[in-house]
Amino acid sequence: MVVKGGVWAALLVLGAPGPAVAQRALPVAPNGDLDRSMLAALARDIRAGRYSNIHSVVVMRHGRIAWEQYFSGPDERRGTAAGNVVFGPNVLHDCRSVTKSIVSILFGIAVAEGRIPNLDAPVLDHFPEFADLRTPERLAIRVRHVLAMSSGFEWNESSRPYGDPANSETAMDAAPNRLRYILERPIAAAPGQRWTYNGGNTQLLVSIIERVTGMDVERYAERTLFRPLGIRRHEWLRYPDGKAIAASGLRLLPRDMARIGQLYLQRGRWNGRQIVPESWVSASLSPQVRIADRPLGLQRYGYQWYLGTARLGERNLPYSAAIGYGGQRIVVMPEMDMVMVLTAGLYRDPRQSDIAFEILLDRVLPATR
């Protein structure tokens, strides 16, 4: 996944859970304090082809759906062509690496249940079968470093396209033992010092969840997160051995992606119930490692969430975001009491980040009142 900086990358902000009721549709507010003419112009531009292959835009304001639009275009299921799809509120869509942020939520729930008592434990403590890897430099890699993608493993998921054997995630997918492949990577940096985009880290997190709970991660998500939020339709794509594809395998409805954002906007509460501890929401949205030094755009990384600053008029707005390959986005903006979701089929498009953030930052955000 390539994430570009600049004004467009500044949009993402974090949020909390909204007032939607479990097992019921999200409430709809036709007004939502939005400029409808500006958003209608955006929808026309998408349909006219100004922005290629956008599949949906969902905007939640003050806990309700304020605006949503669905389009049609070619799509994939994690690299497998799915043909031309007419999208709508009941059509599942790849989340791609938005999955990582949802894994972080599940990890926080497991921590709250007392199943993972110590984020400062060596990550190898959870994988005793790899005793031969317990060298001092690898034992310095703590669970919290894996959460923040600052584990220090040598990993290249950016300069080579997915599907290329030189891409580290593609190589991990093909490895006879995915966990060993991750944990035996050379050490390229001291843990906690450098952010490197690494889907292998998320694979380790899901493996830890499954080991400490004794449950498949999708079943655990159903019990602890999806059902409480009213998410009834989902799919977690699998490797040939049946294991969930941890870093990029989840498929959800765009409205349910909005529920995830609304959950964090409401600091982990949903319908009066604390689904995720507020302390975990705060920790996962706190800067753990630097991505880049810039006044706007993506600046820091939390626990599998991106953190940055957006600009609206004279205001700087902090944000949190879940970002997925191909243009998948959940953007949470607390100061605007707003969650924005985008799904798209911009796979292999070098401008995917620019297009996604132009729509959200330059078109949707200025329409708020």
Image: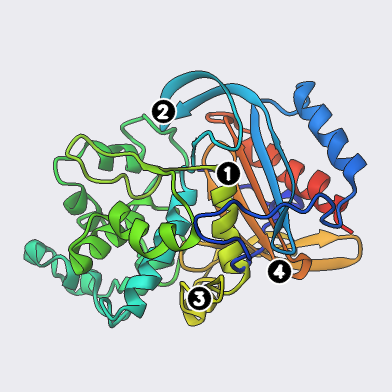
Which is closer to the viewer, label 3 or label 4?
A: 3
Residue drawn at (88%, 44%), measured in percent from left and top? 36
Q: Amino acid at mark 2?
A: Gly
Label 3, residues with CA under 10 Å away: few <14, some 14-19, many ≥20? few
Q: Nearer the viewer, mark 1 or mark 4?
A: 1
Q: Is residue 264 left or right of residue 188?
A: right
**What amino acid does circle 3 point to?**
Arg
Q: CA distance from mark 2 to mark 1?
A: 19 Å
**Label 1, on which residue?**
254
Q: CA distance from mark 1 to mark 4?
A: 20 Å
Label placed on residue 79: 2
Of 164 and 253, nearer the camera is: 253
Q: Earlier in the sequence, mark 1 or mark 4?
A: 1
Label 2: how many Cα within 10 Å (few below 14, some 14–19, many 20+): few
Among the two numbered marks 2 and 1 on one chain, the one whose residue lies closer to the N terminus: 2
Q: Position of residue 263 (x, y in %)?
A: 56, 65
Amino acid on which disc 1 is placed: Pro
Question: Given this view, does label 1 or label 3 mark the residue nearer the observer?
Answer: 3
What is the CA distance from the residue labelled 1 to the residue labelled 3?
23 Å
Residue at x 33%, y 50% (from the top left corner): 246
Mark 4 residue element: helix
**Which element is circle 3 on?**
strand
Query: Is residue 93 left or right of 180 when viewed as pictured?
Result: right
